[in-house]
Amino acid sequence: MKKLHLKTISALLILTALTLYHSAYQGHAASDDGRKIYYTLLKGTINNTLAADFEGVLQEAEKADAKVLILEIDTFGGRLDAAVRIKDKLIDSKINTIAFVNKKAISAGALISLATKHIVMAPGSTIGAATPVKLSYWEEKPASEKIISYFKKEMQSTAEAAGHPGDIAAAMVDSDLQIAGVVEKGKLLTLTTKEAIRLKVAEYEVRDLRQLYQKFQLEGRAVENRPLAWTDKVAELMPDKKTIFNPTLLWFLLGLALIFLEFVVPGVILVFFGIGAWAAALTTYIGLSASFQSQLLVFAVTSILLLVVLRKWIKGKYYGHVGDVQDQTKNLDEFTGQRVVVLQEVIPDKMEGAVEFKGARWRAVSDEPIEKGETAVITGFDGIILQVRKKEEG
């Protein structure tokens, strides 16, 4: 009887162990469903190029039925329209989204963070201070009351839609809002990591992505890294919004300098690169080339294309045409004795003189001084330089 009792207990223990093992195995198998983690980086200035790139990342993650999309955010903000564009996509997305604020999510960065379903923050990070400003070349000014009112509601509704406190989000935009124990009237709300967790804006404090994976039980899943290619490398090259010079102005000044140098070092080359720089300035100003790579491409393509297509024609107009193979005797007879008008004073032993011959401007030299406006006679030529003398009276 005692042996039977022991056998019964042993059988029950084995059965229980097998049941627990099976449950654990099934649970592990269920979590290992092959769905990946998608990761992207939003760093630097928020603009329309970054928004377009992010839309591509989100579309890829949705198509792959990703388990989660993690956005690591480190930005002072940027264009309001670009931030709203990203926000709309996040709110509409069906996949799980997590904002990892690593250092700062200010202004437009705060809006994007609040559009995700979960927010976590690295130690020492901040989120908030989202009052829009109007930027010019030289300074930043507060945006109109209309824009501030709109952005306040945009922040509040975004936070509420994603399950974050709307009144806290609104206080990040409107300094007139007062929340007892949180922010006084007349001050914009910016939260530290610990304050954000206390106020239910953020869920966890994590040091790195590994800790984030642990908090959300994502360990062991494959990760698709999709950092936006230009943000990590190029954003730091672009001038800060408080810098006097912006890319448009820099390209314009470069073009001006190159065109000026063309007159100092003539050769009909630098002028085309100057025009290329102005083309880059124009496309930057109207928003067609936001990244440095695209600006450089516009500059290079425009400059080289103009150089190849127009240089020979302009040299012919400016200096006169010189054939590849010349009959010097024939050309000498054609030029010698012809009258020309002096466009720029001809001074002996200097190469600064200029005359007009057959509708074109030619460089000219002479053994005697000839004043501007006088008529001279061609006595010979050397390549593209005419030798002249004063026209004898009578």
Image: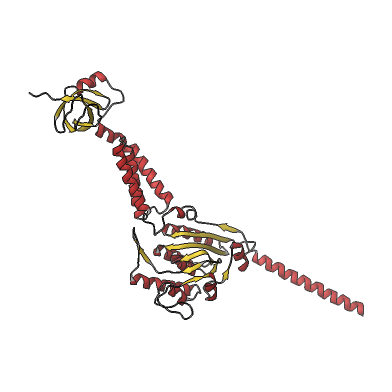
Q: Residue furthest left?
A: 394
User: Is 203 situated left or right of 246 in this image?
Assistant: right
Q: Is residue 91 in view from this perspective?
A: no
x, y (%) of residue 155?
Answer: 43, 71
- For the residue pair 14 and 291, the one nearer the viewer reads as 291
Quarter of the figure with the C terminus? top left
- The image quadrant where one finds the N terminus is bottom right
**Left or right: residue 196 compared with residue 32:** left
Q: Left or right: 80 with respect to 115?
A: left
Residue 100: image x %, image y %?
54, 65
Q: Residue at x 15, y 27 (%)?
A: 376
Corner quadrant of residue 175: bottom left
User: Residue 268: horizontal and vertical position, in percent?
Assistant: 31, 36
**295 vs 324, nearest the viewer:** 295
Residue 109 visible in the shown view = yes
Note whether 252 is above or below 197 in the view shown.
Answer: above
375 is higher (above) or lower (below) than 15: above
Residue 88's image quarter?
A: bottom left
Q: Is residue 84 above or below residue 306?
A: below
